[in-house]
Image (cartoon, coloured by chain):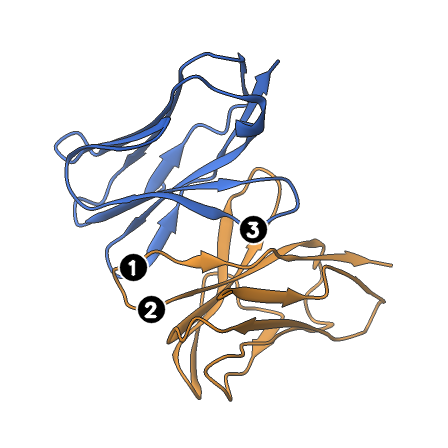
Amino acid sequence: DGGITQSPKYLFRKEGQNVTLSCEQNLNHDAMYWYRQDPGQGLRLIYYSQIVNDFQKGDIAEGYSVSREKKESFPLTVTSAQKNPTAFYLCASRSTLNQPQHFGDGTRLSIL
Amino acid sequence: QKEVEQDPGPLSVPEGAIVSLNCTYSNSAFQYFMWYRQYSRKGPELLMYTYSSGNKEDGRFTAQVDKSSKYISLFIRDSQPSDSATYLCAMIVNDMRFGAGTRLTVKP
């Protein structure tokens, strides 16, 4: 089945630690996205990538970093500079600009 | 003013009721409109996708778009407890813009 796989489902971060969230898709989509979802605030765009080896900051990129070395993979690193990282993180992809995005099932990140 | 406004609810209805969920938007350039359903601790799943004014029906779900009023709606007929979820509207001009989501509970 084609889809987007996010791992792990739950992740805990210690103070001063960087953590990496995985996102893999087998839909052959060019564009991939990372969102943060907080209660009552909807989806906020962190980073997106339209093509391999290229990515752009979204609305709340500070404290996060990404890479796009392969078409299928778009990992997100939450750095120690992100002071309020507790949230639900969603990865999405889409084939072309006018097509809807498809989402993974998210990673919930919490602070220890 | 946000580009996409959606009443966050919560909305609670009895089983069998007709549910109406709504979004308004400010950017007349939006051309494509979507509704997503998100269950707790899951990612959003696409319910409806439309690009023209008027109605689109899929089973118990009807999506309505009124571009002149910059208003979109999702109607759920014969609502079921399994419809309890958060519903997000979304729109595309180049990038996608999402509403904040409306939390719906259908009580048996």
Q: Residue at x 50, y 79 (%)?
A: A72
Decide if residue B38 is on the left or right side of residue B92. right
Q: Position of residue A77 (x, y in %)?
A: 65, 75
**Which residue position is annotated with label 2?**
A95
Residue A12 visible in the shown view: yes
Please name the residue that numbered disc 1 is placed on.
A99
- Point 56% across, 78% down: residue: A66
Quarter that holds the N terminus of chain B? top left
**Neighbourhood count class around disc 1 (C-alpha, 10 Å): few under 14, some 14–19, many 20 upward:** some
Q: Write the residue at 41% across / 41% down.
A: B99
Local secondary structure at mark 2: loop
C-alpha distance separating marks 2 and 3? 18 Å
Looking at the image, do the residues carrying marks 1 and 2 touch, with CB atoms under 8 Å apart?
yes
**Left or right of A35 on screen, residue B60:** left
Give the blue chain's letter: B
Q: Position of residue B60 (x, y in %)?
A: 37, 26
On screen, residue A41 above or below A12: above
Q: Amino acid at mark 1?
A: Gln
Camera-side residue: B17 or B33?
Answer: B17
x and y, in percent, of residue B14 in the image? 54, 10
Spatial distance from mark 3 to mark 1, Cα to Cα? 17 Å
Q: In 3D space, how far apart are the residues under numbered discs 1 and 2 (Cα atoms)?
A: 7 Å
Q: Chain of mark 1?
A: A
Q: Chain of mark 3?
A: B
Describe residue B65's horizontal placement relative to residue A9 as left or right.
left
Chain A colour as displayed = orange
Residue B9 percent across, percent down from the top left? 51, 24
> Which mark, by number, is residue B43?
3
Tell me the amino acid under the disc marked 3: Gly
